[in-house]
Amino acid sequence: MHSPKWLLLAALAFACVASAASPVPTYQTQTLEGWTVRIDDRLLTPANKPATNKALVLLAAQLKDVVRIVPAGPVAQLRKVTLWLSPPYPNEEPRATYHLSESWMRQNGRNLAMLKSVEFSNVSIFEKEFKRMPVLVLHELSHAYHDQVLGWEHAGLAAVYVRAMASRSYDCVERWRAPELHSTFERAYAMTDVGEYFAENSEAFFGRNDFYPSTREELGKHDPGMLALLQQVWQVTPTTTTTPIPPPVPAAFDARCYYRLTTLWQGEGMSLDILYDGKANNVPILARTGDYDGQRWKLTPEANGFYRLTTQWRGTSLSLANAAGNRPLLVKSADVPEQRWKLIPEPNGIYRLTTQAQGDALSLDIVNDSIANNIPILAKTGCNDSGQLWKVTTVPVPPEHRVEDSP
């Protein structure tokens, strides 16, 4: 798995200024937890040795975890894979790589002795990387197991990967980045190819992955076919039977209730409201959450799974519609596709809102203007856009606020 580009800056601060592409590098050999580790001598200079020694301690801890969590048979196979520690390459992100392709290595001037081995050029940022990916080393060793033990063309693995691709269940999943960073929603790295599908889900199976499904339990619910295959190929006896979670289906919203709409981006402290401007009073806005009838939305079912959105304040005579410039407005209710909204379920009880007129290519979003960040708009649908991910929550209506619909 590649590291984020910003980690390159940290690697450049590493005292090793020589390139791993320098001719004829020499190596020292150590044994860690049964693995042969080849260390580039440039990492062992007086300036670099303290950081390298720390990295070796961290690497040994990860390998010890591999021995602890992976059955003995597969561990014996994994220990046949040599681990190489290199300085960062010029003009390349520091990373961990399983070298599968001899032709790629030749084209990129790499040391062919590393073929079928794992190379780490991110030694200087091990600590940061291991916090983000607690079983990063197992991820790379999983590539080796896939290639050297299962065979890259493993039919069972190819079949579950094709099913996962077809289901699109990995197309927009949560990604945990770091304690100080917000999670994002994006296409799972597992969908890169069948190799990453195996390695990413092996991370979830044995430890914790940074993409959903993150754990064995989540994997069993999200992709039970892959869970069963991993149990087989990694020689793990199933201990519990998980009940698969069916794909999200459109919710049946109760037309008798009112709902609050908030975004994943701005959180539950800001709700979709109607601006009281003393004029038309029909402009939607994100406003501070409160006990206001402009924030109580009725979702009335229409044909073919669409809904009409109206507020308690303005009543059913005014409906939310996509208007000029893809700006939503409350307009006179009519039987038109601009007023029919689809609520598309996403993982974790979140919805995406689109209109029948514009289709799923445009989703209800909030403009990021770096000022108020509170103006709704229909924008191009994107997975990693938390302004397009809406939480729909039932809200009670106090008796004193129960009003008749506008005429």
Image (cartoon, rainbow, N blue to C red):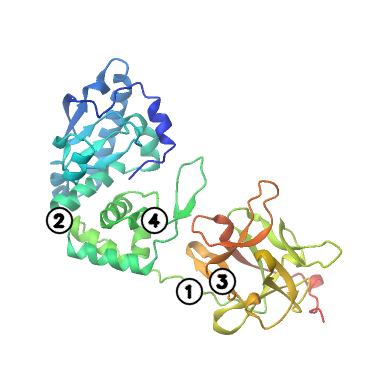
Horizontal side, residue 91 vs residue 140: left or right: right
Disc 2: CA contacts within 10 A as few (<14), some (14-19) or many (>=20):
few
Earlier residue among tags 1 and 2: 2
Q: Tell us which disc is closer to us: 1 or 2.
A: 2
Mark 1 lies on a secondary structure that is loop
Q: Can you identify the residue that label 3 sits on?
A: 343
Earlier residue among tags 1 and 3: 1
Earlier residue among tags 2 and 3: 2
Horizontal side, residue 359 vs residue 241: left or right: right
Q: How far from the left and from the top, in percent, is residue 353?
A: 58, 68
Q: Quadrant of residue 127?
A: top left
Question: Callout 3, which amino acid?
Answer: Leu
Q: For the point 29% across and 63% down, which residue is it? A: 240
Q: Can you identify the residue that label 4 sits on?
A: 188
Question: Callout 2, which amino acid?
Answer: Gly
Q: Can you identify the residue that label 1 sits on?
A: 249
Horizontal side, residue 300 vs residue 348: left or right: right
